[in-house]
Image (cartoon, rainbow, N blue to C red):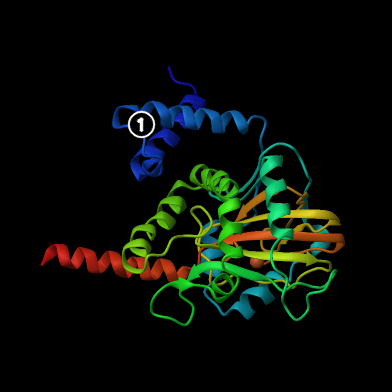
Amino acid sequence: MTTPEQNEFKGRFSLLMDCGAMNDKNWLEGEVKHRTKKFLQLWQHKQKGMVYTISPVTYVQLKENRKGTQKEVLEAAKEEDINTFTVIKSDEKHHAIIDERGVILGYRYHVKPELLETLKETTADLPHTGVNAGKRGNYPTRHYTVWRDYSKEPYESADYRKELPASKEWCDKNSELFEYLSDGLRMISPMTYVRYRGARHYLQARHNLQPLCGIWFGVAINEVVTGSTGTHLDFNDSGYNCVVPWGEYKGGALVLWQLKMIVELEPGNAFFFMGSLIAHNVGEIEGVRNSIDLFCHKNVLSWKDRCDEEWRGNMNE
Ligand SMILES: [Fe+2]
């Protein structure tokens, strides 16, 4: 007899193996099964006592409703009364927001303190040369990413190139954090992980480019945000954004409109969520809040799909 837990473990193990989510670990062939099991056990150990909140809308509904313009989607989402929203309080335990079919729409946990410390220090060391920059100035958001905005082929964003070599150093110094979060995504959504990874080979082979933040193509770095932010959808993103805030602040929770939820985010929380489907904003902040937002633009993935098609076409010739 197998218990429901054993069945669940089996299912998750099979998915990891079948979709190839562990392939880039480059483990010896004879060790893959064993090490995947260990990896999954470790993740489940970290999840001990985790809490689930069920979303009133499903992933499929969110996708359906996103078909309008960004404005229409936002207006519909904002009809909800924020005072009735469920507040997901801060907690040491992992917290997942799932729909009735078990699809993960949001996932929160704490990152290792030493990784947050590095993020803090390296971000403070970044050059602040913008027009608004002053000691306490409102620094603009920077984007260090590979993307394909207004272009046929992928390229490194202007901010990244302009701020070299500091931008590359920042990415390198935080690589452990990005790998840690990428391992999180690997377990939260193995299929998303594999989809993002599918672009890696083409980026390297065709343009000598690499994703800049672990499995994600890039990051938005938001410094010294002091007010609430406007409600928006990250229409250009695909899959799961991952947000990590830090600083000395109170408030700054993330409002998820269609889900009717408010997620408290403490300094050092990582929150994975579908920013392209869920209208969101950061609530009132007391103090100073910084954050990174890891993302993959859809346009790089559509380019990757085209590369796949070309490759398959060549194979069939
Ligand atoms: Fe966003």
Question: Residue drawn 51% across and 63% down?
Answer: 296
Q: Is residue 158 left or right of residue 263?
A: left
Which quadrant of the picture is home to ligand 1? bottom right
Mark 1 residue element:
helix
- Residue 233, image x and y in percent? 62, 70
- Residue 283, image x and y in percent? 80, 63
Question: Residue drawn 54% across and 63% down?
Answer: 218
- Residue 181, image x and y in percent? 57, 47
User: Which of 211/74 is in front?
Assistant: 211
Of the 4 image quadrants, the one containing the C terminus is: bottom left
Q: Is residue 284 left or right of residue 178?
A: right
Report the label total.
1
Q: Is residue 96 above or below residue 72?
A: above
Which residue lies under the disc numbered 1? 32
Quadrant in the picture for residue 199: bottom left
Label 1 CA crowd tier, 10 Å (few <14, some 14–19, many 20+)? some
**Residue farthest toward the front in the current orientation of the protein:** 165
Q: Is residue 120 left or right of residue 29?
A: right
Of the 4 image quadrants, the one containing the N terminus is: top left
- Residue 46, image x and y in percent? 62, 32
Query: Can you see residue 218?
Result: yes
User: Which of 263/304 is in front?
Assistant: 304
